[in-house]
Amino acid sequence: MPVRWQDTWETARRWGAAAGLAFATAGFCAQLKVSHDYHGLAPVPQVGDLTLSTVVLDRDDRLLRAFTSADDKWRLPVELDAIDPLYFQMLLAFEDKRFYDHGGIDPVAIARSGLQSLRHGRIVSGGSTLTMQVARLLDERPTKSLKRKYEQVLRAIQLEHTRSKADILRLYALRAPFGGNLEGIRAASLTWFGKEPGRLTPAEAALLVALPQSPEARRPDRFPRQAKIARDRVLTIAAKAGVLSTDAAMSAMAEPIRARRHAMPLLAPHESRRAHLRDPGKHIQKLTIDRDLQAALESLARRKAAVLPRPVSLAILVADHQTGEILASVGSPDLLDTAREGHVDMTRAIRSPGSTLKPFIYGLAFEEGIGLPDSFIVDRATDIAGYQPTNFDRSYQGTVTLREALQLSLNTPAVKLLEAVGPARLIARLRRAGVQPTLEKGIAPGLAISLGGLGLSLKDLTQVYAALAREGEPVTLTVCRADCSGAGANGALPVLSRKAAWMVSDILQGLPQLRSAEAFHIAYKTGTAYGYRDAWAIGFDGRHVVAVWSGRADGTPVPGQTGASAAVPILFEVFQSLGPALTPLPAAAPELLGVLSRDVPAPLRFARLPERRSATPATHRLHISYPPDGAELELGASAQSGTQPLVVKFKGGVGPFSFLVNGKPLGLKQADRQLVWQPDATGFADVTVLDAKGDSAGITVLLR
């Protein structure tokens, strides 16, 4: 068929136009390079100047949690060596084959783009380089006008003259859009694949290359078909460029698009939040937390909380007492659980420690020569200047050894020993451990601190027990790998002598060992705060110290909850999570073995307690003799019918007497030292007796 001259002319015109465009572009680029018009532009921002998300990393630089940037973007910092090289190979094959050869704009690519457009009568491919795309991403303004296109070209040349090729790739990896508020390859990989971008499959790498071209129209969670088409096109080009074999590309194309969007990691949320608030401008926060252990204990806390009444919460802290590093910190079972006030970090909340300080009272007694573990002490009702402690079960054991008294957590022996060593000395030793107990203002510490009459946090108790585990040597617990701990332990003065600390640890190792078939036992102590408000268990082996708290964040009592029933089972499960074998506690020093192998010296056969001056006769002082404060009384079903009243007996004082129940007057005045009161409901009840002189006495009982 003869060729028409019009067709020949049209073909020649198109080729001529394309050649002209190529030469014009080349000349224009050369002119730009010589003129350096970019000197009038603002400096290219450093990576550190970009608005980035804050990431919180664990002890091995693994991501615990990320926060959106100041402009509400997921834009996570990332280094090039943390990204799979396959991604960059595909990116350059698809976007900019001559990236390492051009100076910001590629005349060959522009000429090719113009030629393809002339051939097809539409834009088939663009001539934009990767550097020009970075220039557009940094500017964040439309580039539709010729002036804006020109400025983008200038910015690309500026980038090439002031930044290395690696810097340009890193800027792209940080700012490329991937749909919604996702920017940067790290945020995209975590969201679309649920993993870091260090190891990507060919299909994953291709999708990350394709998304920035049209991030909203190709979002895998909304438009999986369009995402697959774009991904497969990248795979095809990668195979043609030799980045992938044909078989590898075909295999990747067969993979479906995963449309599920993964949530950003949210581990150690309370500690991560604290680190972020401490230094909001710091993009990378590095903690001592172990991500695997943290994840395991958060799962354990959620599992345990699921079987507890909804308001009841719990917290767990694990530290390496040899280094002072906090390895896991669970402030609540679920940060978003409003019923349990999950946003409150219960590892830092100040609560009553119950009986958890008793080991340190005994340690001081050993240190001061008041007794030895096998010295005797009498457990019976006592009155120390009006303070009348009772045991938890309202019974008394009679004559017991100090070892037995501590293992049974008897109250009256602990109070007697504290009287002997002095409450102020116990407070001073706690401060040596680096903690500051919360005490009532203006009032000197009294004997009640032996049973929890002060305030400490779970972290405080962990730090105090870390010193005990270190044979009395204090250590400051820290959660960040930089110095962010603030005031810590003195370090120069021991919390207990080595001898006393070993004796206490040896006693605590003798407690029942749940699920423990190991050769070495852990030393631990329980505690239950007044009114069942807090349940504690703190234990340690030769390396780790673990603390568990259970209760309600608002301080409301949890009837029947004790450290032994609620916290100890969790404590042993945490130790199981630390590994199959426990680290043994230090063996006794030779001089200690010699002391302990002999019979108790005669002067220490009984603990040397101070003789007390006679107190004011009980008949002159108003006090309730029955029921004991904190008693749990079973009234039975008849209490609801009004046939079984509660009898409150009291002594001393001057009549007539009046009464308050739960803060409300009963409207009675009587001379008898006995109140017969009909409860109208079960639960906790506060009963107060007032005499004619204004003296008062009160108790709190639990009615069932």
Image (spheres, rainbow, N blue to C red):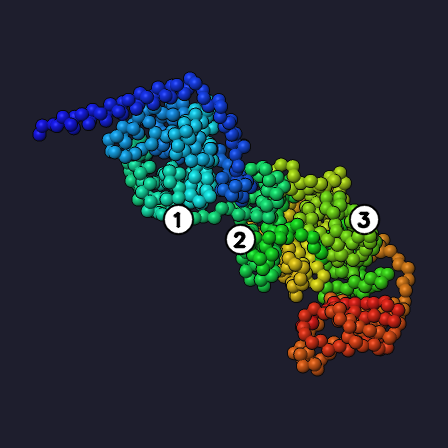
Q: Earlier in the sequence, mark 3 or mark 1?
A: 1
Question: Residue 247 appears in which quarter of the rendering?
Answer: top left
- Is residue 464 toward the left or the right of residue 601 in the image? left
- Could you tell me residue 589's position as x and y percent? 72, 43
Relative to residue 534, is residue 48 drawn left or right? left
Mark 2 residue element: helix
Q: At which x and y percent is residue 446?
A: 81, 55
Q: Which residue is mark 2?
A: 299
- Disc 1: which residue: 221
Q: Nearer the viewer, mark 3 or mark 1?
A: 1
Label 3 is placed on what type of residue?
Answer: Arg
Element carrying mark 1? loop
Q: Is residue 408 above or below residue 472?
A: below
Q: Nearer the viewer, mark 2 or mark 1?
A: 1
Q: Are the residues at dot 3 and dot 1 in contact (C-beta closer than 8 Å)?
A: no
Q: Is residue 541 visible?
A: no
Quadrant containing the C terminus in the rendered view: bottom right
Q: CA distance from mark 3 to mark 1?
A: 64 Å
Disc 2 to disc 1, how far (Cα)?
28 Å
